[in-house]
Image: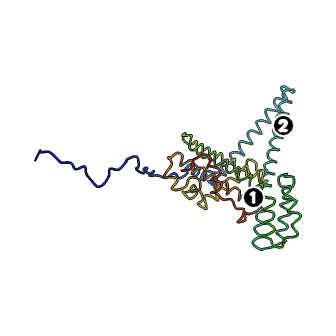
């Protein structure tokens, strides 16, 4: 083998590439919003029939044991120490009274949510059949439903004055939507934006395991409860859980718990997820999914179906909620 000098030609037509100008290496796995997807499936998954029977029988047995034990304790204490036994009996009676009041409030909350569902179904039927009489009945029920809500007083008065001037069901319900529900829609959108910001911030900044899932589920539960209260549902604990499960079941069934660059592009522009760090990308995706859950909750909790003019835009809510957290790329 020749060991002579080797000529290296540095005069090449191609220039040496600048490493600083090289494009970033894209993530092999794009952020998919795993926290919100897990929270959605967790909320949507219902217990089996066997589990319901188990927990129902367990609660019945535990309730019977506690009730009998409390009764024996109170009666035996009355025999040994009448004064102390009387005090304990009064306290137990007060506890039972408070429990009954809580149960009645839960029943009233569920009944109010049912009334909202009935209004929405009646409005759907009036629009589908183009029945002006049904539309007027729905409008009057809607006015009575929001009686006492100061933010709807002006809209209720205007709607009441103009009911007789409308000759189509869709036009009349559109008037009620414009005048009565517009301020409530704005308040519900604010709740959705706040929840989306919270979920996005915690996901992006808190690296603890399962913290993002817990935050996403807790924020969604609170958001759905607040949206129900905005529209007059006043959901209690059981009502809120039933409402939450209905929203998430709808989202999972329709495959809406998914997000892509098209939803985030109004905020950052371009190929969003490939330009962000993994953690911040997950934050954006989870925040966007929270907004999507909020829009679904608005549709479920609203006493009238959204018309095309008033249907909230998930992209617009995401842009308003997250554009202040992440600078434009």
Q: Nearer the viewer, mark 1 or mark 2?
A: 1
Give the SS element for disc 1: loop
User: In terms of depth relative to the viewer, which is nearer, 30 or 297?
Assistant: 30
Q: Position of residue 227 (x, y in %)?
A: 73, 52
- The image shows residue 175, relative to residue 42, as above or below, that is below
248 with respect to 154 (left or right): left
Residue identified by numbered label 2: 94
Q: Residue at x 83, y 44 (%)?
A: 101
The 10 Å Cα crowd at callout 2, few under 14, some 14 to 19, many 20 or more, is few
Q: Residue 15, which numbered label? A: none
Residue identified by numbered label 1: 302
Q: Residue at x 25, y 49 (%)?
A: 10
User: In terms of depth relative to the viewer, which is nearer, 277 or 45?
Assistant: 277
Q: Indicate which disc, 1 or 2, sits on the residue closer to the N terminus.
A: 2
The 10 Å Cα crowd at callout 1, few under 14, some 14 to 19, many 20 or more, is many
Circles 1 and 2, Cβ within 8 Å, touching? The answer is no
**Colour scheme in the image?**
rainbow
Q: How many marks?
A: 2
Q: Position of residue 135 (x, y in %)?
A: 82, 68
Report how far apart the C-alphas of labels 1 and 2 lie in the structure: 37 Å
Q: Position of residue 68 (x, y in %)?
A: 77, 38
- The image shows residue 248, relative to residue 279, as above or below, that is below
Q: Position of residue 228 (x, y in %)?
A: 74, 52
Give the SS element for disc 2: helix
Q: Residue at x 76, y 70 (%)?
A: 127
298 with respect to 283 (left or right): right
């Amino acid at each position: 083998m020749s060991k002579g000098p080797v000529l290296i030609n540095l005069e090449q037509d191609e220039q040496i590439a600048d490493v600083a100008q090289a494009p970033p290496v894209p993530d092999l796995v794009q952020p998919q919003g795993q926290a919100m997807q897990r929270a959605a499936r967790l909320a949507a998954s219902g217990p089996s029939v066997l589990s319901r029977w188990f927990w129902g029988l367990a609660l019945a047995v535990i309730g019977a044991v506690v009730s009998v034990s409390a009764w024996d304790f109170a009666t035996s204490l009355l025999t040994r120490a009448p004064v102390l036994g009387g005090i304990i009996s009064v306290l137990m009676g007060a506890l039972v009274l408070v429990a009954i009041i809580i149960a009645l409030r839960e029943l009233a909350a569920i009944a109010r949510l049912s009334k909202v569902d009935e209004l929405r179904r009646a409005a759907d039927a009036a629009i589908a059949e183009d029945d002006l009489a049904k539309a007027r009945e729905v409008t009057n029920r809607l006015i009575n439903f929001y009686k006492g809500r100061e933010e709807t007083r002006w809209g209720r008065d205007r709607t009441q004055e103009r009911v007789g001037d409308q000759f189509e069901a869709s036009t009349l319900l559109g008037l009620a939507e414009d005048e009565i529900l517009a301020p409530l829609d704005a308040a519900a959108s604010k709740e959705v934006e706040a929840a989306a910001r919270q979920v996005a911030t915690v996901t992006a900044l808190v690296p603890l395991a399962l913290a993002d899932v817990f935050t996403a589920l807790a924020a969604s539960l609170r958001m759905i409860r607040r949206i129900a209260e905005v529209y007059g549902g006043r959901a209690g604990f059981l009502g809120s859980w039933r409402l939450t499960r209905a929203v998430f079941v709808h989202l999972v069934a329709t495959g809406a718990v998914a997000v892509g660059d098209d939803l985030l592009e109004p905020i950052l522009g371009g190929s969003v997820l490939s330009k962000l760090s993994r953690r911040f990308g997950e934050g954006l995706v989870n925040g966007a999914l929270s907004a999507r859950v909020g829009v679904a909750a608005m549709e479920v909790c609203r006493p009238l179906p959204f018309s095309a003019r008033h249907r909230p835009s998930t992209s617009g809510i995401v842009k308003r909620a997250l554009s202040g957290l992440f600078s434009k790329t």
